[in-house]
Image: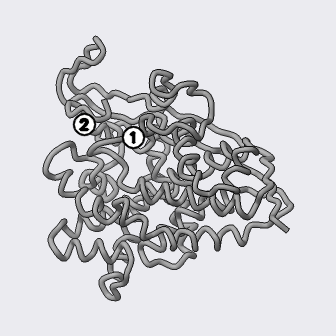
Amino acid sequence: MILDRRFGTGHPKLMHLLGLPEGRALNYKRESISFYNRGDKRRKLRQPIARLMSPHASEAFRQDIKDVVADIISDIPTHTRVDLIEALCDPTPSRVYCYWVGADKGDASYIARTSHTVQQVHTRDPEKTPEIVEAFESLLDYADARIAAAREAPSDNLISDLVRAANNDEFTDDDLRNWVIKLAEANTDNSSHQIASTIIELASRPAIWQRLREDPDAIPIAVNEVMRIHPRSISTSREALEDVEIGGVHIAKGTPVFANIGAAHWDERYYPEPEKFSLERAGQPAHLNFGGGVFSCLGRYAITIEVEEVVRYMTQTFPRIRLDKAEFSHSPMFTNVTDLHATLAPLS
């Protein structure tokens, strides 16, 4: 269903359900890629980002991501209980975003806070609409300021590349602003929860933690397995563009549908012993944590690098980690880590 061309985005109905009022926030949503179904417009919006955040291009970010992670972890106190969401999981993606848009790392807390707020659209709770609108309007102003700064002093970063793409008519100035907002919108909230889930899944398995310390080359395999066994995305929403029949079930045009990613990841026809955490799953289907096709997450390679580098630094620096408290909540679409406290013991 994720790849089936008879299904499109369910985002417009989500905004209607929230009762998002007319104004700058709703206009942004209407013009961003979230509202466009399959076709030329969506392809045109995706192409520059797909190029700038391809596997190869994302690898170019790795050293800077390593530097961000090292800087953050060096400030985390040891031998005492630490809130890792506040100290590590939120700052990592938000500081990476600051690097992308040429902002001071002091802006990271604003990016983290705002990303968490705007992602509340997925709660489908109209009571949260006023704060969501306020956060989006703030991001609109922030994006305009960052774009103006990039135009005045171009640099070797993602926002300058986006400005150059707009100058080359690969997309409009409005599309440029929408992408700068979209990267902030989806950045901290999704990445932070995935980093937290990964730490919990790996640190709760001391033998795996030790193996990754001894064999860092196994980290990408371990991260993929975490994203299979406990993905951030439990499901993804679509809307039937026409009358459809899947598995003998009739789905009328306009019906919202959720593809159950979590169930797919635990399907023993594709993942033998799906409840078992295994580093030996070569040749089995890739996880669906980032969706697929024209609706796949364009930042998936960079996000994966962020998670890998956190794991690499944590296992090397803290061979002994004690999880003091780890709690999850689950919505119809997402896994959320609501609490993550740990005590870290360094090498010396």
Question: Looking at this view, is 70 or 84 the one in front?
Answer: 70
Q: Amino acid at mark 2?
A: Gly
Q: Quadrant of residue 163?
A: bottom left
- Labels 1, 2: front one: 2
Q: Amino acid at mark 1?
A: Leu
The residue shown at (46%, 49%) is 119
The residue shown at (57%, 42%) is 226
Quarter of the figure that contains the C terminus: bottom right
Identify the disc placed on residue 57.
Answer: none
The residue shown at (28%, 35%) is 3
Tell me which label, 1 or 2, sits earlier in the chain.
2
The residue shown at (56%, 56%) is 307
Identify the disc placed on residue 8.
Answer: 2
| Secondary structure state at the residue bearing disc 2 | strand
Left or right? Give the position of 266 relative to 54: right
Q: Quadrant of residue 50?
A: bottom left
* x then y, percent, for residue 292: 33, 41
Badge 2: residue crowd in 10 Å (few <14, some 14–19, many ≥20): many
Determine the residue located farthest toward the bottom in the rendered image: 153
Q: CA distance from mark 1 to mark 2?
A: 19 Å
Quarter of the figure that contains the N terminus: top left
Left or right? Give the position of 78 relative to 306: right
Question: Looking at this view, is 127 or 1 the one in front?
Answer: 1
Q: Is residue 116 above or below residue 226?
A: below
* x then y, percent, for residue 164: 24, 77
Q: Quadrant of residue 144?
A: bottom left
* x then y, percent, for residue 312: 63, 60
| Residue beneath disc 1 | 18
Badge 1: residue crowd in 10 Å (few <14, some 14–19, many ≥20): some
Left or right? Give the position of 313 relative to 172: right
| Secondary structure state at the residue bearing disc 1 | helix
How are the residues colored? one colour
